[in-house]
Image (cartoon, coloured by chain):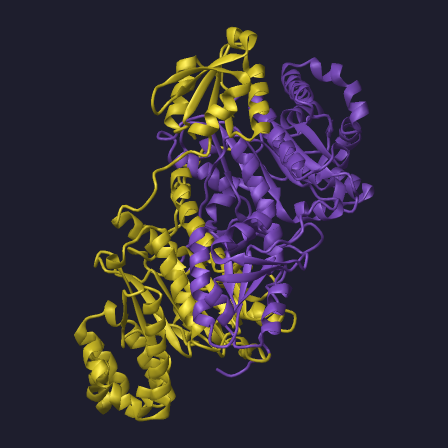
Chain colours: A purple, B yellow
Amino acid sequence: MKPNKKLSLEPYKGTRDFYPKDQFVQNYIFGVWKKVAERYGYQEYNSSILEETDLYRAKTGEEIVNEQTYSFTDRGGRDVTIRPEMTPTVARMVAAKRRELTFPLRWFSIPNLWRYERPQRGRLREHWQLNCDIFGVDGIEADVEIISLAYDIMKEFGAKDKDFEIRIYNRKLLNYWAKVVGLNQEQASKITKVIDKKDKISTKDFYVRTEEILKEKTEEFIELMQSPKKFEERTNFFQKKEEGKLAWKEINLVFDKLESRGIKNIRLDAALVRGFDYYTGMVFEMYDVNPKNPRALFGGGRYDDLVGIFGVEKVSGVGFGWGDVTTKDFLETYKLLPEFKSSSQLYICHLDGYLDKANELASSLREQGANVEVDLTERKIQAQIKTADREDVPFVLVVGEEEVKSKRYKVKNLQTGKEEQTAEKDIYQLVKKNA
Amino acid sequence: MKPNKKLSLEPYKGTRDFYPKDQFVQNYIFGVWKKVAERYGYQEYNSSILEETDLYRAKTGEEIVNEQTYSFTDRGGRDVTIRPEMTPTVARMVAAKRRELTFPLRWFSIPNLWRYERPQRGRLREHWQLNCDIFGVDGIEADVEIISLAYDIMKEFGAKDKDFEIRIYNRKLLNYWAKVVGLNQEQASKITKVIDKKDKISTKDFYVRTEEILKEKTEEFIELMQSPKKFEERTNFFQKKEEGKLAWKEINLVFDKLESRGIKNIRLDAALVRGFDYYTGMVFEMYDVNPKNPRALFGGGRYDDLVGIFGVEKVSGVGFGWGDVTTKDFLETYKLLPEFKSSSQLYICHLDGYLDKANELASSLREQGANVEVDLTERKIQAQIKTADREDVPFVLVVGEEEVKSKRYKVKNLQTGKEEQTAEKDIYQLVKKNA
């Protein structure tokens, strides 16, 4: 093979290479996600990154399928899409084993997802996402648990209440508004998408787009969509009709229950609708209060009709997706990322002719449970030790004639510089204790 | 949304849904892989599942790119491919940071990979693969370590030496043959692919395909490619020329060093070539000896020219890929898979009106470190307990008036049926101890 200078050294646009130090951060984030999800009894699942495109046509929403998916035809003529989100997949899996599964069901997964977009802060073409879902609980208790779980993840990351905010709304209230204002279904669906973009476009743009859809009803609708304060004053108005009352009751219950759990950084957000068509009840998003990170850390809601769309008996569901990109931005902003720590505990160097002995020692230490690297080169000792240091391996030792004879080694802590004469049989304890 | 009976409930052809019990098996396999790789000091990395197609055109081999990849054009006109293997990506990453990285470098990753193929036993369209690589060690020591690492993984899985076999060969020897027989480069490349398919096609087919390429040289070549016994007899023949001698020396060193490490289930396999174009030295594969599982568990080799193809200074490399599908088949065949164990430790049921108290108790136990599920339904106690049992949660308790007052709970072990009166403050210890 000949050198080919045209070959790109970069990862594909909008994606990331995870060198060990980057992967360390990913593993930290995934580890916290998994730990807290399992604390709440969620079981891990996964599926393929490719699904037939029909799955998303049916459920994700037109804009995403038409403009933002990675869709193509496979060599056998099937239309397939790299998953842009996990909810359709999990709904398919639940529907497929509707009769065998035990409900309520708590599931989580950490899939990678794809959107064709202009890469920007907080938003890449490929990202990973924690998905947590409960199936088979109709009551608001499930919504409360899902939000509590997300809150506990923030606490596990070390976040302070004052640095993030959970915004909550209810699709039923939005649907009710639409009825009050007299919108047909198409208008209601279109206006949902415009509201979803509210924070990303100018106030004028928002007005213009709203007017395109609502015409003479624009003023009334926008008035209804004002800040939470005004919104609260309107409680009585919504209480009048059964449907508004139910939505309102759910919102109040969620607020009360979250507050009694000590979760107080929550607020009602009448502009929160979420981009997906499938939500049917409570919806919620979490934001960093720092304007540097304007994208939601997590978002989710209730989707009681999604499983039923597969032609099986309905199963209610509520869940969220939580992205790794915004999470890393948040943790960096608030200096909450842990320092890199190598998974290696000991680096073994060797004098000329002692490589086999170095390998033997490594084998024995590995059997005891240590993570041990052996320098396989024939470089000078100093060069070998330098490699250990640059790779952040905490301990180093050298194998030579004297050490092999005496079965005693100088084990050096590269962080403190401290060197300790150690019997072969005690190396593991030393390395383990200080690791 | 209306039910849509045409929506498929199946995962995309050749892929798998991982329900929690399947994911448990995946996590077990990934866990063993990761543990042993880290024992040897390998650091985890990852990258995007999409790469520009040029990357594979340059390195993976024509057949795979032309017939077996998932390639398409993105919405911006770029030709992209879902990675069919990880080696080109890792070589790209090493080349990109050639000057910053510390060599030797030990890296591992567990990517999912895609091939468009007819799904069959041991071979699916999507599979996961452990990839371990060392960069920057020119000597055979790296090859020996990589094979030892793979062997240790088999031991960690509980496999017995008699149940698997490591086959070893050297591309340099193949190249030398080709020279001895007088093949040009194109013939040599083509014949490599035919040899790679040897076990999958009939002896007659093999002869016919070989003859198409080699014409009158067929007999001589096939004779040279006979069983290891005959091969050994020819040692002297190969020793005659420098090039053959070097290849032969490497093979002998690898055998000696592996045997001195106690790895004896190895054999020379003159038909082992590996399908990729980029190998330059030792190649190896591991097989189940049970003919039910005819596909390699892992395969790899040395590729000293791969990083250099990006137009940077050469870095030698040796590594392997190890698939999850064949691994699971092997572990099932030899009954080495662990039994499913829920990550939940305790399921909390509640009498009417005690759900909030149940949630409080759960919160407190989670803070102590337990994985606790709360039944969020209003079903009868028996139905709640049945859910815990069907989900394989080991412990269950009920929250009611009496329990809340006395702060004592009957904690039932659902596996043994044993019930224990436990003070609230001791629940965590009980659940943890028995988990």
Q: Can you say whether B399 is above or below B321 in the image? A: above
Residue B405 in view, yes or no: yes
Q: Nearer the viewer, residue A281 or B160?
A: B160
Outermost residue on the front side: it is A406
Quadrant of the rendering where the C terminus of chain B is positioned: top left
Residue B216 x/y as whole percent: 22, 91
| Number of numbered discs overlaid on the protein picture | 0
Q: Can you say whether A36 is above or below B208 in the image? A: above
Outermost residue on the left side: it is B204
Q: Can you say whether B275 is above or below A83 in the image? A: below
Residue A195 in view, yes or no: no
Residue B8 x/y as whole percent: 40, 42
Q: Residue at x 77, y 38 (%)?
A: A289
Q: Residue at x 38, y 87 (%)?
A: B185
Q: Residue at x 73, y 30 (%)?
A: A269
Q: Nearer the viewer, residue B78 or A178?
A: B78
Q: Quadrant of residue A349?
A: bottom right
Residue B426 x/y as whole percent: 52, 20
Q: Nearer the viewer, residue B432 or B335?
A: B432
Q: Quadrant of residue A166?
A: top right
Q: Residue at x 50, y 40 (%)?
A: A88
Residue B36 x/y as whole percent: 44, 55
Q: Quadrant of residue A145?
A: top right
> Along the horizontal axis of the image, is A374 left or right of B259?
right
Q: Can you say whether A190 is above or below B425 in the image? A: below
> Along the horizontal axis of the image, is B331 left or right of A112?
left
